[in-house]
Image: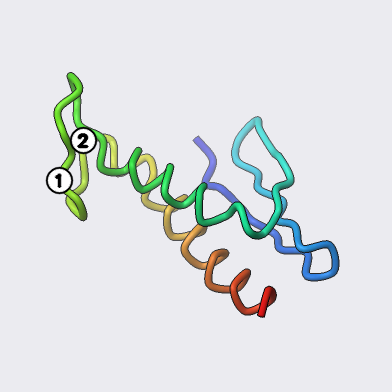
Amino acid sequence: MADMTITLDATNHTAFMAGGRWSQTVPLADLSGWLKLYRNLWARLPDGKKPVPGKPGPWAVFYEADVRALEGAVRKAQEIMR
């Protein structure tokens, strides 16, 4: 599984996200929603059990690098959108 890469385009206010066999371009404003999704995946527990906020679930190792990439991209996007 390839770690996610994110390239920001300040001119068009978009982010190009790529990981493994997928890629897509999204508005910079949407990155925070992607970060929320990946944090939820990071914390997810089996069998529909409720995750504990801030505590990793059993699959967290698969999402660690992606969460870090998204956190950095969100910070940079906020600077661009000021």
* Front label number (2 vs 1): 1
Give percent across and percent down for residue 58: 21, 35
Q: Amino acid at mark 1?
A: Val
Q: Helix, strand, or loop for circle 1? A: loop
Q: Nearer the viewer, residue 67 or 28?
A: 28
Q: Residue furthest right?
A: 11
Residue under the point 19% across and 51% down: 53
Residue occupied by mark 2: 58
Residue occupied by mark 1: 52
Give percent across and percent down for residue 5: 61, 53
- N-terminal-most mark, 2 or 1: 1
Quarter residue 79 falls in:
bottom right
Q: Nearer the viewer, residue 19 or 12?
A: 12
Please give left or right for residue 18 compared with residue 47 in the image.
right
How dense is the environment of label 1, judged by Cα within 10 Å: few (below 14), some, or many (20 and up)? few
Q: Quadrant of the C terminus?
A: bottom right
* Snapshot colouring: rainbow
Residue under the point 21% across and 55% down: 54
